[in-house]
Image (tube, helix red, strand yellow):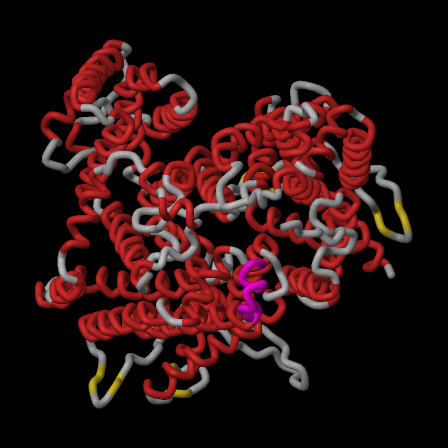
Amino acid sequence: MEQFAQQLVNGLTLGGVYALIALGYTLIYGVLQLLNFAHGEVYMVGAFLGYFVMTGLGGPAAPVVPVWLMIVLMFLVAMIGSGLLGVAVEQFAYRPLRNSARIAPLISALGVSLFLQNAVLLLFGSQVRSYDTPRYWPATGAPELAGVRISPVRILVVALALVLMLALVQLVNRSRFGRGMRAVAFDRDAALMMGIDVNKVVVLVFFVASALAGAAGVMVGLVFFNVYSYMGFLAGLKGFTAAVVGGIGSIPGAMLGGFLIGLVESFTTVYISSNFASVLSFLVLILVMLVKPRGLLGKAAIVKV
Amino acid sequence: MDSTNLNLGTDEWVAAHAERSAGTPGPLDRARAAWEAVPLLVRVLLPVVLLALVPLAGSSYLTRVGVNLGLFALLALGLNIVVGYAGLLDLGYVAFYGFGAYTFAMLSSDKFGLHLPTLVTVPLAVVLTAAFGFLLSLPSRRLLGDYLAIVTLFFGQIFVEFAISGDSITLPGRSQSSDLTGGSDGISGVDRFSLLGLRFESDAYYYYLLLALVLLLTLAIYRVDRSRVGRAWRALGQDALAAEAMTIPVNRLKILAFVVGAGIAGLSGAIFAAVQRGVFPSSFDLPLLILVYAAVILGGSGSLAGALLGAALMSLLPEALRQPAYGEWLFFVLLCLAAVAVVRRARPLLLVAVGTVVVGFVMNAVLLAAGVQGLPAADWTQGLLSRGMGRWLFVPVDRLHWGNAAFVLLVVLLAVASRIRPAVRIALLPVLLWLATFVWFVRLSPEPSLTRQLLIGALLVVLMIVRPEGLLGRKQVEVL
């Protein structure tokens, strides 16, 4: 039972992170029908940005500002930096391909992913860097639940993930930008004719999606400590799996998928084998694809010829 | 309309009025026309004869490069069927290569004490890999483009993870965990091929085997491409929905493309295991996948000659990068080509060249005057230009920081340059060329594998924007 609760907490933490990445995929796919393979790399850059903010403010041993301020700054810088990176990637790698064959932006995205990963490797080397959270934020006084101590970092991560998701839902459903976004997702050409600035919407979507990935990067750093240039690939893959399982293009689907994949992974690690965590989430993906090819909450697309 | 002139996949209007969109023929088009004027038999036989002579040069290194090229060409041919013809974005393709290699290794090594004859193991590896491809294609055939891509990509990743963690698998009904794949150490001590009484002692045997296989396969694919199945594949690649409406059995053909592609990859994998005399999980990871994709797409997706050309470029160029002296030349050739591609006229080009030289000397003087510690030219260049290079280019002692800063600056400037008016861009070009050379010598040339990945990544993006049909591909027309 204790182990179960522990894994539940782990799964929720991981799930929050995957859900944020999945939301980015879903947003971009919803608007452009583009599979942004570079999304995982944006997340990795976010994790690095958070790390550099931390070292820039005195490092884990002696931060020069209060810890809460440091963490806020880490998230802010990582989100804004990742957001700008996502916008830049869209400008240079996807926008020229907006109207070309379907395969072109996919290949371009693979290229961007490879380039970003190796650029980071070139600039910062291959060594694993550590956020070293316990040194400035010890887990003392952590609340206990069902015999499991939940560290405050995890509470922060899950809570922040939920807050970001809620904010996103509000943004999409309530704001002017969200309305434009939904219109573009529904029918880009029609939206254009209705006077919606499609390019502006796409830029904003890329910014929001990438900022979420950047936040996910800092969260992973805070909870699991290690950041390195290869971390983006697998996380991106998991995030995408989550998006597809939930039904790509659907925002609640991405959240559901993220938590589902996170839970599956953390329970597999303990109850089956840590080696097969990815295998099992892959099986979940295949199963969902077989039963509901559009994902759990996705809607069947009607192809008009 | 005879069958050789079938403009499959081209809209009728576009086919009839292609000259409207075509500009004046460039040097590439002229080279292509000249090449196509040569009789087909000569066009095929000339490279084959030339390639057959390579092992006779007596350089084991060269033969090894040739073997790698052959393996890579097989892979590219197979992927060209899946992606180029049938239009299925299979991002788990390399897993089939790995599956073939592992199957062969398990059947002919001390791992399980099996040493079956090559005539059994290789066909078995091919058939098993094809069957494996069939299994994967079953869930995949329902998936549309992007979904297929992600499922197969994930699958490829799972294969690698399985190979790494396959050394402690508890099979049902057994209490002890058993070792299937050798974990991250892989399987070593794999048998050499021995066919028809010939033991494949050296790379030259494999080289000729691969040459024959590539030739045979090229001919076979050439025939298939012009058959009913080949036409159906192309129709499927163009528009699956329309193909289905034309009564083409879309699902069956998708599976067939998957199976054939997997079989070819499996064959290549089996030979790879024998050449290398071992298999390791890291050989079948993402970098190889991207390299094969880059080859097929650079050559021209859906073009047979393109796949072979792409395979040659993508396996020989990275090889050249590994040798600093060749890498230097390769870099300058690429730089000149890039400059020509941007400027395209003789007089501005001359100005740019002069400008670049001047920028170099000025920067050299500035950096020297600023008191930056520099390295003597002999430390960083071996090429023919090395004598002049020392005066023109300045390589600081602190390569890491200068190089990183210059790299970031270069990327930013390139991004800016792609957004400004052509006239201003040409004015900026000398600075860019010098900066690129600086980054190359200071930071990139000591890191060949990283450089390779960076260049391939950038290449894929630029290629998709500038020439998505690749070098020899046919322009796709999307009719909406």
Percent across and percent down for residue B261 are 43, 68
Q: Is residue B392 visible?
A: no
A173 sits to left or right of B190: right
A82 sits to left or right of B195: right
Q: Is residue B206 visible?
A: yes
Q: Which residues are magenta?
A: B241-251
Quadrant of image for the C terminus of chain B? top right
Quadrant of image for the N terminus of chain B? bottom left
Front residue (pair A39, B223): B223
Front residue (pair B398, A34): A34
Front residue (pair A130, B358): B358
Q: Residue furthest right?
A: A146
The main secondary structure of the magenta stretch is helix
Percent across and percent down for residue B278 are 36, 71
Percent across and percent down for residue B306 are 30, 55
Question: In the image, what residue occupies the spot 13% across and 37% down?
Answer: B383
Question: In the image, what residue occupies the spot 9% across and 28% down?
Answer: B387
Query: How many numbered marks are there?
Result: 0
B209 sits to left or right of B268: left
Q: Residue furthest front?
A: B1
The quadrant holding residue B461 is: top left
Q: Judge whether A209 appears above or below B214 on screen.
A: above
The quadrant holding residue A187 is: top right
Percent across and percent down for residue B5 are 31, 58
B433 sits to left or right of A161: left
Q: Judge whether A273 appears above or below B38 on screen.
A: below
Question: In the image, what residue occupies the spot 60% across and 51% down?
Answer: A237
Question: In the image, what residue occupies the spot 34% across and 14% down?
Answer: B424
Residue B297 falls inside the magenta stretch? no
